[in-house]
Amino acid sequence: DKKPLDSAEVKLFPDATMKAGTEIYTGSTSHTGSVEIGRADMSFFVKVTLSPKYKDARRTFHRHEVCSDQACKAQIALIPVPGDGEIQCEEGTENCYLYTDQPGRYEMVAALEWQQRGKAKERDLDLWVRNWDCGVDA
């Protein structure tokens, strides 16, 4: 469902520590899924929260990367929380496993974001997907 998300809470912080009381902006998205913020900060950290059905989005923005002149625009995607399953990693190793209520059935979701202005426009996007067995044999 790729509709704009209405009433998502948007908070701006001076940095990623997100200390309570340091918010430099708090507001909500409109019915179009957007929010307009008039700030001149060179960089800031954004946290977007909708509901327990979606994972919070957290991003650091640097004005020189997402702006042309004074106009800045960024799009943030929120990812739905999967229905079941959890990833567990063995302590002290890089071995991680996906456990689900229905073995053999799981859903993975990826959100792709990009900016149309600034340095981000020059970036390349390569997607690589493989199953676990293939990765182990490589």
Image (cartoon, helix red, strand yellow):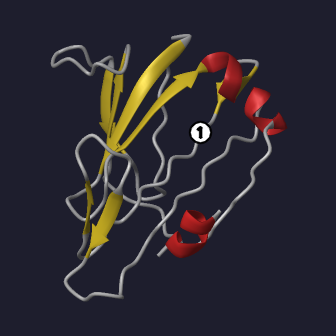
Task: Give left or right: position of 49 versus 114.
Answer: left
Q: Can residue 81 be seen?
A: no
Q: Nearer the viewer, residue 65 or 27?
A: 65
Q: Nearer the viewer, residue 11 or 37?
A: 11
Circle 1 — which element? loop
Q: Nearer the viewer, residue 94 or 105?
A: 94
Task: Give the residue drawn at x 27%, y 40%.
Answer: 92
Rendered location of residue 65, percent (x, y): 69, 24
Farthest residue to the right: give it. 122
Quadrant, the C terminus: bottom right
Question: Residue flagged by tag 1: what amino acid is it?
Answer: Ala
Farthest residue to the front: give it. 137
Task: Give the residue drawn at x 40%, y 31%.
Answer: 46
Please name the residue that numbered disc 1 is placed on: 74
Task: Give the residue drawn at x 22%, y 44%.
Answer: 91
Rendered location of residue 50, percent (x, y): 28, 54
Q: Quadrant of residue 68?
A: top right
The answer to whether 37 is drawn above or below residue 29 in the figure is above
Task: Give the residue drawn at x 59%, y 19%.
Answer: 62
